Image (cartoon, helix red, strand yellow):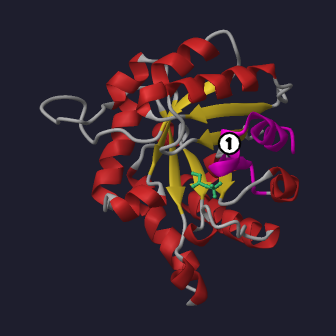
Amino acid sequence: MRKKIVAGNWKMNLDLEEGKELVRSLIQEDLSAEVECILIPSFVHLSEVSKLTEQTTLKLGSQNNHAVNGGAYTGEVSAKMLQSVGVSYGLVGHSERRIYQKEDAETLSAKVQQLLKNGINPIFCCGESLSERKNSQHFETVEKQLQLLWELEPKEFEQVIIAYEPVWAIGTGETATAEQAQEMHAFIRAQLQKNFGTLAAQCSILYGGSCKPGNAAELFAQEDVDGGLIGGASLKAKDFAAIVNAF
Ligand code: 13P
């Protein structure tokens, strides 16, 4: 059985007090025990959120980590540091970082390695732009983005979660239809199967992009959609809880 996962990517939102308040509210919510819930706040929040969630089932994730484990890299944060504050999942390859920070496959591959070395599960993000979708290049794009995973050992791959986030659906209010999501998730699983055989069936593939309480149930009902990576709707405890409970 694959894990059902709902992860909230807070992006660059909420100050420390607002973040703590959100966590306190979430702890009051009745969250399905079948679903692994992951909070992915900014670096600023991590250690406080870690303390608040210590006695709960909520897990902690990071939005980014550096490609090396430590040293003279002013302003950067290593996977080793993240592990030390209780991070157990790490986003890699989010489209916002691919676009704004120009992160390429080589960098992303090194980041994945750093997470794995420090016992953190990478949540590897992929997804096509609007023009790629319009030109029917979406499968090709995602296939290319996934390629850096093929160098992993099977033992390493077992730690990886995939998030499919079509760029045109992020923060736009426009969600992929359940059919579009299923089609791509099945394609991704077929690629995983080609490279890792039966392990592909165990890998959770999350959908991200304007996922809300109103559309989560339909998306999560799809055979190959194992949960969601939630942006905007993860900033409200009630909405996030409704998405978690939408399975
Ligand atoms: P939205 O849910 O705000 O569209 O963001 C999705 C996302 O990018 C999560 O990583």
For label 1, count other residues whose C-alpha is less than 10 Å away and answer few (under 14), some (14-19) or many (20+). many
Instruction: Tell me where the magenta segment starts and ends, as one range.
Output: 224-246
Which residue extends farthest bottom? Answer: 135
Q: Quadrant of residue 189?
A: bottom right
Q: Image quadrant of residue 218? A: bottom right
Identify the secondary structure beneath mark 1: helix
Q: In the image, is residue 79 above or below residue 52?
A: below
Q: Residue at x 35, y 40 (%)?
A: 113
* Image quadrant where one finds the N terminus: top right
Residue 232 belongs to the span the image colors magenta:
yes
What kind of residue is marked 1?
Ser
Q: Is residue 221 in sight in this rendering?
A: no
Give ligand 1's quarter of the image. bottom right
Q: Is residue 1 left or right of residue 15?
A: right
Q: Residue at x 42, y 31 (%)?
A: 43
Say whether residue 244 is magenta: yes
- In the picture as drawn, the residue positioned furthest to the top comes out as 55
User: In x, y percent, where is residue 38?
Assistant: 63, 33
Q: Position of residue 159 (x, y in %)?
A: 53, 37
Q: Is residue 24 visible?
A: yes
Q: Is residue 231 left or right of residue 243?
A: left
Residue denoted by label 1 = 234
**Residue 224: x %, y % from top left:** 76, 57
Residue nearest the observer in this picture, 34 or 239: 239
Disc 1 residue: CB within 8 Å of ligand 1: yes
Left or right: 200, with 34 as reference point: left
Q: Position of residue 63 (x, y in %)?
A: 46, 41
- 149 or 169: nearer the eye? 169
Image quarter of the C terminus: top right
- Give above or below for 176 relative to 220: below
- The mark total stands at 1
